[in-house]
Amino acid sequence: MPDSKNIFILMGFILLLTNLLIVMFIHPIPTDSRCPNCHSRAFIEYEETIECTHCGLKFFKEFLGSEIDKENILSDQELEGIFDSFPELKDEKARERFLKSIKKDLEDLHE
């Protein structure tokens, strides 16, 4: 019968292996993703966005997995620059309504 030290080592190995498998298979960013701007694979992941550690730009995760061509994906900073060009979109509520209407139009287009 194995002693308690060997059982402890075996359990630790099983836990580490399980953790590794979970991280590998339940990762929200595809491993083949690259930054649309500089093509780096180094990201910091946030809830809805990722930030490229090489160029510093943030991108929405839903855009990376979409049908948008990679060279046409805009960073969060670029989107903010577009919104800042329109005085009527400076208000956060107006901006949210505008984004919801665009999202609805895109969904209707795909139906």
Image (tube, grey):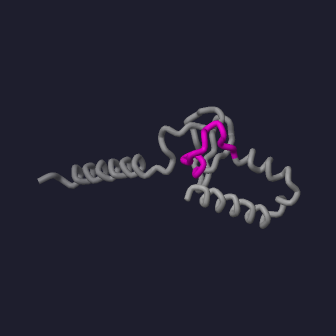
Q: Residue furthest right?
A: 87
The quadrant of the picture occupied by the N terminus is: bottom left
47 or 88: nearer the viewer: 88
Q: Quadrant of residue 94?
A: bottom right
The x and y percentages for residue 107 are 60, 59
Q: Nearer the viewer, residue 108 or 11?
A: 108
- Would you say residue 85 sits in the magenta stretch? no
| Residue placed furthest toward the left | 1
Image quarter of the C terminus? bottom right
Counting from the top left corner in percent of width and height, residue 104 is at: 65, 62
**In this picture, which residue range is highlighted in magenta?**
61-75
Up-down: is 89 above or below 85? below
The vertical placement of 74 against 54, above or below, is below
Residue pictured at 63% horizontal, 50% vertical: 60
Report the residue at 25% width, 50% height from top: 10
Which residue lies at the image location 70% right of the left edge and 62% below the top edge?
101
Count of numbered marks: 0
Q: Is residue 16 left or right of residue 108?
A: left
Q: Position of residue 30 (x, y in %)?
A: 48, 44
User: Residue 39: x percent and y percent?
Assistant: 60, 33
